[in-house]
Amino acid sequence: MRKVKYVILGAGTSGLTALGMIRKQTDDFVIINGGPLGTTCARVGCMPSKAMIQSANTFYNRSKLNEFGISGGESLEVNTEQVLQRVRRLRDRFTKGVQAGSTDGLSEENFIDGYAKFIGLNLLEVNGQQIQAERIIIATGSRPVVPGPWQVLGDKLLTSDEIFELETLPKRIAIVGLGIIGLELGQALSRLGVEVVGIEMQHTVGGLASPKAIDKAIELFSKEFAIHLGAAAQLETTESGVLVKFGDKSFEVDAVLASLGRRPNIDLLDIEKTGVTLNQRGMPNFDINTMQIDDTTMFIAGDVNAYRPILHEASHEGKIATLNAMNYPEIKSFARKTSLGVAFTDPDIGFFGANYRDLDLDEVVVTDFNLEKNNGRAIVMAEDHGVICLFGDKASRKLIGGEIVMPHAEHITHLLGWAVEQQMTVLDIIKMPFYHPVLEEAVKAALYQLYSQLYSKEERGIEAELTLLK
């Protein structure tokens, strides 16, 4: 039996964060990873999807050229085979870059290619070898959810793990699940010439929760491809493709993209053999501020814990888990960052701070500002569409969150997320400088709406206006 101080399970973002910290202090560690290297983001997630989206949006912009006095756009063509080749070329560049700075060059003593399973508390088996660790960081990531009965579709069933490997795109595709991934890829495929049908059980798209944002998103994205909400999809294989049944509707497609979320890979570890408490979903109890599992020397970080399955959170959790593993038994709680999320659709979707679903509407003011209300910059860009939904706390008058559907929301979301992180009041933010003409003026208008709802008329009098000049 081999004994080591640290075992890192998984070479994704959290695991590689842990690796980078631990290897600076000691060689008494091993990182164990089964399957491809390069992180979910670089290999099958953020980066290849953005490469496809960029090609799709660049081609789609030909339809706007006449608006700007530029003719000839209708003669442009897209070569989807070359688009997919570029996606894979960039994907390989990103994954090789990740490996070059992390697992490449590790000795066999420090890196094991295999799938580890627990056989006891702090005791693992991988490739027939038993390893006992003083501290373990679990960072084994997640995998796409695929209902068992759908497996009969064979290669007609795709997930985000397979779609970027295609040599050519199908002519017709059904996207089942219109969360962030499904909506991003559905729009991109549609813009690349694929006939897309989107199906979502919930009455929302892109992970949105606030009513005005949902309505605006459905209005805008439905102009590009068919969207059906509120019922589950039933799939049947046919000689030429897949028959998709939805409510009283049915249609045939060449392939189905299952975009039903991702499942944590905790179930592949036999973690129940450690004796830790598991909930009904098979997840161990852990502290989101320490990443510690119960009162053990095991820590869990990244997508595998299903708390905030997104890269920057995985990196942050990897740091928390590693610091506490290294300093055990002194466990420190760390504040979590303000929640932040972006869907790289057109227009973008952004989320920050408090989730609308969790709001007590008796304690919070919600305001909605439509971009159609004369934002000069959006008009000259022919992008005057979208909505900014902001949430303000009545007692503290702080901005606490919001949802945005608007062009370039990836940047606006960061700015407002930072304001929430700094616990700024709405008045604090209004006092900041706003240039003209910029999209941020729409944010200013939304903030003024929120200001008028949070502060009384008397509080917004002449004296208050003077403070805005300071």
Image (spheres, rainbow, N blue to C red):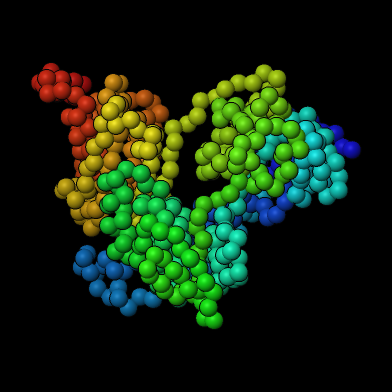
**Is residue 8 left or right of 119 when viewed as pictured?**
left
**Residue at the location (86% across, 45% down)?**
129
| View extreme (bottom): residue | 239
In the displayed structure, would residue 301 be above or below residue 426?
below
**Residue at the location (50% across, 73% down)?**
242
**Residue at the location (50% across, 55% down)?**
260
Residue 38 can be seen, yes or no: yes
Q: Residue 291 falls in which quadrant of the image?
A: top right
**Residue at the location (35% across, 38% down)?**
356
Q: Nearer the viewer, residue 31 or 329?
A: 329
| View extreme (front): residue | 248
Residue 345 can be seen, yes or no: no
Q: Quadrant of the C terminus?
A: top left
In the displayed structure, would residue 457 be above or below residue 137?
above
Residue 357 percent across, percent down from the top left: 37, 38
Q: Nearer the viewer, residue 40 or 145?
A: 145
**Is residue 65 left or right of 270 when viewed as pictured?**
left
